Image (cartoon, coloured by chain):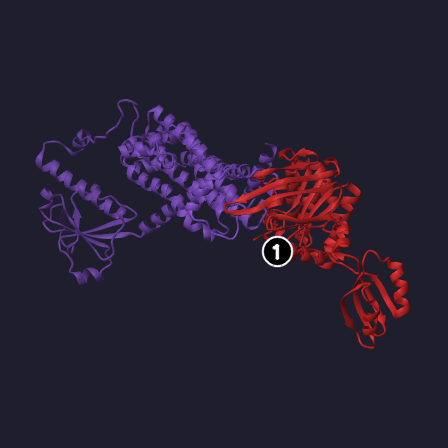
Chain colours: A red, B purple
Amino acid sequence: MKDSNSSALELLEVRKQYGDHTALDGVSLKVPKASIFGLLGPNGAGKTTMIRMVAGITGPDSGSISFFGKSLTAEHINEVGYLPEERGLYKNMRVGEQAMYFARLRGMSKTEARKELLDWFERLEVDGWWNREVADLSKGMAQKIQFIVAVIHKPKFLILDEPLSGFDPINAARIRKEIIRLRDEYGTTILLSTHDMSSVDELCDHVALINHGRKILDGPVHDLREKARAGKIDLTFRGNLISFTAALGSGAILHSANSKGDSIHEVVLGLPSSIPIEKFLKWVTSEVDVLSCSPKTISMDDVFLRAVKDSAKNKMKQS
Amino acid sequence: MNRWLIVVGREFKTRVRKRAFIIATLLGPILMVGAIVIIAFLAEKATQSNAKVLFVDHNNLLTYSLPESDGVRIPSCTECFPERSYLEYRFTNEALTTEEFIASDFTAMLELDDGIMQSAKAVLQYEVAPSTRVTSGIKRDLGEAIERLRVKNESALDYETYKRLKVKIGLVTQDIVTQDQNVENKTGVGFAFAMFMFMFIMIYGNHVMRGVIEEKSSRIVEVVISVVKPEHLMSAKMAGIGLVGLTQILVWSLLSWILFLAFGLYAESSGLLVGLMSEQGSPVATTDLSSFLEASDDLNVLMQIDWFMMVGWGAFFYVAGFALYSSLFAAIGAAVESEADAQYLLIPAMLPLMFSYLVNLMILESPESMLAVVCSFIPFTSPITMMIRLSVGVPWWHVVISAGILIVTVCLMVKMAGKVYKTGILMYGKKPTLREMFRWLMYKN
């Protein structure tokens, strides 16, 4: 186990109850420094509750939250950036003035805030909007301003809740690039909550999955994928499927097969760890005409769905 | 503290720079004075259409006729019926029939006979009611004529001596303890203060509620309360908006004062005062506005009011009353998601305010009644009812106790409202009932 100094955020047995509803039921997790940490889970799983705690809006009923090795307190306000899922802007303020307001609330001086904001406005191509009314902004524009406002004070820890919703693909890509830049250039630790699995695949180093207020899975993305792959191989070949299956014998498990006509078949094979992949390849090329062979691609979607299914099964068993 | 001030600054700035606010603030007193001037002007205009009165002296009591005058008679006392721009008489001793009257160009027909010497009553008939200016002109003229006749018939005095001897008594009412004079008139000033108080608490209390609803429904609040504690956000919002109201009051007071001075200068230099005074029959003529006000029975109260005390306590009761009610409004705003949803919660919150207004109407006549005293101690009514009591003079310890109770209540109320606000502001998708809101008070942090 790594020491807690390498964690930006550490939750220990965090519990939160709202009336009869248990929002978080003893969740523990560690968010490594300078990583993009995906927080996943179905609606109502407890993600927002957890995020609000880290953002300093609510506190846990029990358990502890430490922030860069210290107990999380109001003093850390300026070190946290927060982009909530449901977000808005004041209608009766101009764009620049509004951004200044939020920057100053995060402890920036006027001159510093102005300089940084102008920089960000240019980077995200909203310069020229400084003196415009908020009512004139398109949804995407407003989202950009909200993103800027969340990151303007260079927080050590950034919470992004569905940061890409509302963006067109071009701007979504731009924001994705900025998120990665924040981690790489400034070493910002980012807690990213999303339902969009493609952005998890692209962005996250680590993920945690919570459901019904409990953590059901967490770890580095790569490890989780490898685990979910469980040695499966995608193979496409030309030949006879029946004789191929017969030749496989008990050496490998055929999980699925899909014929594409012209005696082309796509199969998913489970290879026992006792058989090295080179040996299998040698054998298979001698049997059939191999068109492609690769480790099975596992999307985070698959990982997610399987974990939720498994946790539901476990729950059934328990009850 | 710094963040709190930033929020206060935003709440204040975004409101005072609104065009509607600037116009209302700068033009408010001008519009009010303007409205009064226009009404006075229209009233003047309305009476300017000349009244032509047929004076029917059935028993030739006050008139005589010249030979060959064709029924036209002449008043025995010509100076009793002076020439006026708005009132003209024609004297006769034969009444017109209804048809004749309608066909004639007379505005009214005044009939009198011997009985007037005892009853002091005459009959005025009209098709369209004449203005009060006309009727009071007739009353004055006829009154003088009858008076002269009676003095001549029943005494050895000449009329000038009689007039000199006649006395009109005025009462200077005075509180024996406080030595305050003309208390009845002062309640009017207190009432005006109370009405402004009521108006400002209503308007700016509503601003607080709408501001809270805007932040909640547009979901800005989530970002703000990650930086500022919810109860601090609420109090900063109240402070910012309260300041907006205070600014408006200040500007209105200043502008009214300037307008008053300007009017004074105009009135003093134009001779308007002299004209007004002679019309009122005042024995003194002055060109100085303050002596004019001093001499006027109705307006001298303006010179007697302790404005410094009224404005000072007025500011205190506004701030405290506003804090009390706006914290209620803020809690309501936090509990709902739209202004429409707020209506059913607003009613119980506004009841005490409405009640104070009604109480004020009742205690206007008797500002020292039990009702007035009790209501000036109850924190929900005191900001409004105390203003009337202050205007007529109130024992200092009453004000201090009332202020003390109010301050304690405000502190409790803000604390309680803060709890409701904190719970409500992040709760979406359901309309809470009053009972639920009370339950939120019990939530621990």
Position of the N terminus of chain A, as image quadrant, is: top right
The subunit letter for the residue under badge 1 reads A
Residue nearest the observer in this picture, B334 or B174:
B334
**Residue B411 spot, x, y in % from top left:** 45, 32
**Residue B330 spot, x, y in % from top left:** 48, 42
Total marks placed: 1
Q: Seen in the image, is B175 located left or right of residue A284?
A: left
Residue nearest the observer in this picture, B132 or B362:
B362
Residue A277, above or below A31: below
Residue nearest the observer in this picture, A128 or B189:
A128
> Which residue position is annotated with label 1?
A312
Residue A138 appearing in the image = no
Find residue B401 and report its image quarter: top left
Which secondary structure lies at badge 1?
A: helix
Q: Of the residues shown, which amino acid type is indicated by label 1?
A: Ala
Residue A216, above or below A7: below
Mark 1 crowd level (few <14, some 14–19, many ≥20, 10 Å Cα): some
- Picture residue at 77% right of the left edge, 56% below the top: A230
**Residue B106 spot, x, y in % from top left:** 23, 56
Q: Seen in the image, is B221 located left or right of residue B276?
A: right
Q: Seen in the image, is A287 located left or right of residue A183?
A: right
**Residue B410 spot, x, y in % from top left:** 44, 33
Residue B192 appearing in the image = yes
Give the farthest residue toward the bottom.
Answer: A262
